[in-house]
Image (cartoon, rainbow, N blue to C red):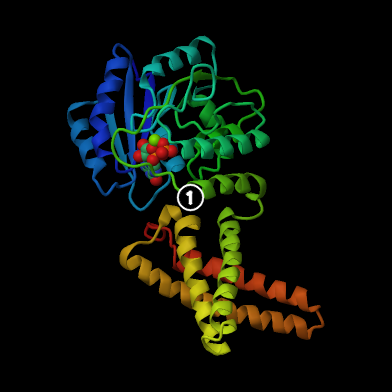
């Protein structure tokens, strides 16, 4: 019989967790027809190599190694689309998710003909066990905000541990954003009102080895996911992120200017020049981390990227001033001319840096 359950596990630097995880899964799933697909984003610790070694002797283990791409949600989707099994489970590689409830999840899906079963920390006996107090706080705030926007009253929409019918996922595939970290949240926002789901309690464990990838970038991505749902049809969400960071650049600029000029450290022109360079650099670093976290430039790529960013933005500033000056000359009121000039510069900067600075790897090669 074909495989009934595929467990999709995204990995990034999880080498030490793979063997214990496979052992635990094998123990609890004995007698079932299952396989596991690891989706590894070319981990520097070579997690993919270890998985490939194991896969040589274990046909229930597969590995998708993605090169030049990053992102938890897109990794999960690639794993899901690589299987024909009717049921798919998503879980972390770090042993934080309690694999002993996997058979229960499958049973509930089948017997109650549900679309989705969520491993939940916030129902009945569930718990956040191994999470630090700060992580619990972040998770609760994110859960609260999502609760305001979700049509399904799910208690733990931030869960990274859930199982679903593949046919259900295929129905909503076109509606997904596939951005960021929270694939379950994305699925819930994209599901019709009649979604049949249930939450099963589990207690989260502490990470066994390796480190969490959750940082401020994930929080930013959380908001971008909503921005994409709200405005995604009209405005690319990267542009929204780029513009918000651009506004932060204005603050950086004015702070440096104040520091150098108002305190009398330098004359106005050097102060203005240094403020411009500092703001451009801070915009570059923030965009590299937040707007283009999935194609983050590192090493020499970071340096080349910075130079191309300076060049693009210098031209952007020129376009901004020239356009605003032209509008002002056409008797457009000062603030509107100024605003439209700044927007023209922002659109230029966004478009040019998207093409030259954070080029999509592999594009144009096939
Ligand atoms: N393929 C892939 N996996 C990732 C990425 N970021 C995190 N992961 C994996 O996704 C799972 C959840 O990440 P984790 O760091 O444990 O997040 P936390 O549980 O919220 O602290 C782990 O198995 C990570 O190895 C990524 O960019 N690509
Ligand atoms: Mg984890």
The answer to whether 32 is drawn above or below residue 292 in the figure is above
Could you tell me residue 324's position as x and y percent? 70, 80
Q: Residue at x 71, y 84 (%)?
A: 325
The answer to whether 80 is drawn above or below residue 69 in the figure is above
Could you tell me residue 254's position as x and y percent? 60, 74
Task: Classify the position of the N terminus by image quarter.
Answer: top left
Q: Residue at x 36, y 31 (%)?
A: 206
Q: Residue at x 59, y 26 (%)?
A: 154
> Residue 256's image quarter?
bottom right
Q: Is residue 60 visible in this depiction of the protein?
A: no
Q: Nearer the viewer, residue 64 or 332?
A: 332
130 relative to 258 in the view: left or right: left
Could you tell me residue 182's position as x and y percent? 50, 39
Provide the residue designation for mark 1: 216
Q: Nearer the viewer, residue 304 or 99?
A: 99
261 relative to 325 in the view: left or right: left
């Amino acid at each position: 019989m074909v495989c009934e359950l595929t467990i999709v596990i995204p990995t990034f630097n999880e080498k030490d967790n793979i063997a214990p995880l496979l052992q635990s899964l094998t123990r609890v799933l004995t007698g079932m027809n299952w396989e596991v697909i690891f989706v590894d984003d070319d981990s520097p610790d070579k997690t993919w190599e270890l998985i490939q070694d194991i896969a040589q002797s274990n046909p229930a283990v597969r590995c998708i190694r993605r090169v030049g791409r990053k992102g938890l949600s897109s990794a999960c989707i690639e794993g899901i689309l690589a299987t024909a099994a009717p049921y798919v489970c998503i879980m972390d590689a770090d042993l934080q998710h309690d694999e002993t409830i996997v058979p229960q999840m499958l049973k509930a899906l089948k017997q109650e003909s549900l679309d989705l079963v969520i491993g939940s920390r916030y129902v009945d006996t569930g718990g956040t066990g191994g999470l630090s107090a700060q992580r619990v706080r972040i998770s609760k705030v994110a859960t609260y905000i999502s609760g305001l926007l979700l049509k399904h009253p799910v208690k733990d929409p931030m869960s990274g541990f859930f199982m679903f019918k593949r046919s259900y996922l295929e129905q909503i595939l076109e509606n997904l954003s596939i951005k960021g970290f929270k694939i379950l949240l994305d699925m819930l926002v994209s599901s019709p009102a009649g979604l049949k789901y249930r939450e099963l309690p589990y207690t989260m464990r502490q990470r066994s080895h390796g480190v969490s990838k959750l940082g401020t970038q994930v929080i930013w991505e959380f908001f971008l996911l909503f921005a994409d749902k709200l405005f995604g049809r009209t405005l690319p969400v990267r542009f929204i992120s780029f513009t918000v960071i651009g506004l932060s650049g204005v603050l950086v600029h004015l702070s440096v200017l104040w520091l150098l000029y108002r305190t009398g450290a330098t004359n106005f022109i050097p102060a203005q020049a240094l403020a411009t360079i500092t703001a451009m650099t801070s915009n570059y670093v923030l965009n590299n981390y937040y707007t283009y976290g999935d194609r983050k430039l590192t090493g020499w790529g970071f340096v080349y990227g910075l130079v191309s960013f300076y060049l693009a933005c210098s031209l952007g500033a020129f376009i901004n001033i020239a356009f605003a000056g032209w509008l002002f000359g056409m008797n457009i009121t000062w603030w509107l001319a100024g605003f439209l000039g700044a927007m023209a510069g922002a659109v230029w900067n966004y478009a040019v840096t998207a093409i030259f600075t954070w080029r999509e790897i592999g594009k144009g090669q096939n």
